[in-house]
Image: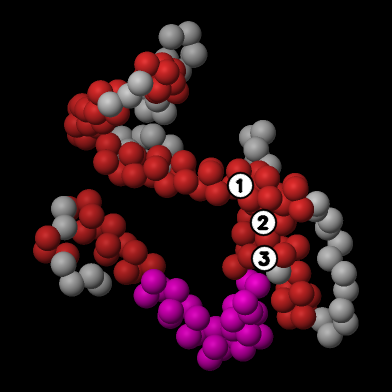
């Protein structure tokens, strides 16, 4: 647990407790795997496990017109192919997925930009007090609406006319009618 929990707001404190609980659970799971299922424990310790998990997850979720994250993980796999291959087999096999240098550079540039935007959106969601799918507890709705408007106004205050137009057109937390009519 962080040492400053008494200085945190209630939502921040609850988030810190949840993060601590999850980490604790992870270490218990890791320890139990070591004790009761050594093959599984060895698989968890492979350097490529996290990448393989991201690849499996990204390939199994709906892409909704955006296969960029999957492509970025595939490119990461081609870059780390020797490590992945050496953990799995003694025979050296060439990477079966070819990407050109230009395709690799462009995909990684887009992926980095997307990660940057995702982090900024997460900061905005946290400041407004909304969940990943933009839901707000009923008792927090008025606060979320006011904070959303305050942040939008703050951003618009220092914007050029072009930036202002883009913000007004693309602000991610504007209230929209469910049927898309307004």
Which quadrant is the C terminus positioned in?
top left
**In this view, 143 is above or below 8:** above
Tell me the residue at 65%/72% (across/down).
48
Residue 75 in picture, x, y percent from top left? 71, 56
> Which tag, 3 or 1, sits closer to the chain's start?
3
Indicate whether residue 29 is drawn in magenta: yes
**Which segment is the magenta one?**
23-49
- Which secondary structure lies at badge 3? helix
* Camera-nearest residue between 108 and 68: 108
Q: What residue is rendered at 28% in x and 26% in y?
A: 158
Is residue 134 on the magenta stretch? no
- Measure how far apart labels 2 and 1 are at the Cα level: 13 Å
Secondary structure under the numbered disc 2 in the rendered image = helix
Helix, strand or loop: magenta stretch: helix
Any mark on residue 73, and which? Answer: 2
Image point (82%, 81%), residue name: 89
């Amino acid at each position: 647990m962080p040492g400053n929990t008494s200085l945190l707001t209630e939502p921040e404190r609850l988030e810190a407790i949840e993060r601590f609980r999850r980490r604790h659970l992870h270490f218990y799971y890791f320890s139990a795997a070591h004790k009761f299922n050594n093959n599984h424990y060895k698989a968890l310790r492979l350097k490529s496990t996290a990448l393989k998990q991201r690849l499996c997850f990204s390939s199994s979720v709906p892409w909704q017109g955006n296969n960029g994250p999957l492509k970025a993980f595939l490119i990461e796999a081609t870059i780390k192919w020797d490590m992945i291959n050496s953990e799995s087999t003694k025979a050296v096999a060439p990477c079966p997925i070819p990407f050109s240098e230009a395709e690799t550079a462009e995909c990684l540039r887009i992926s980095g930009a997307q990660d940057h935007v995702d982090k900024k959106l997460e900061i905005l969601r946290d400041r407004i007090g909304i969940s990943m799918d933009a839901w707000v507890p009923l008792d927090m709705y008025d606060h979320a609406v006011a904070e959303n408007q305050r942040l939008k106004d703050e951003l618009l205050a220092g914007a050029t006319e072009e930036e202002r137009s883009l913000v007004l057109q693309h602000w991610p937390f504007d209230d929209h009618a469910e049927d898309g009519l307004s």
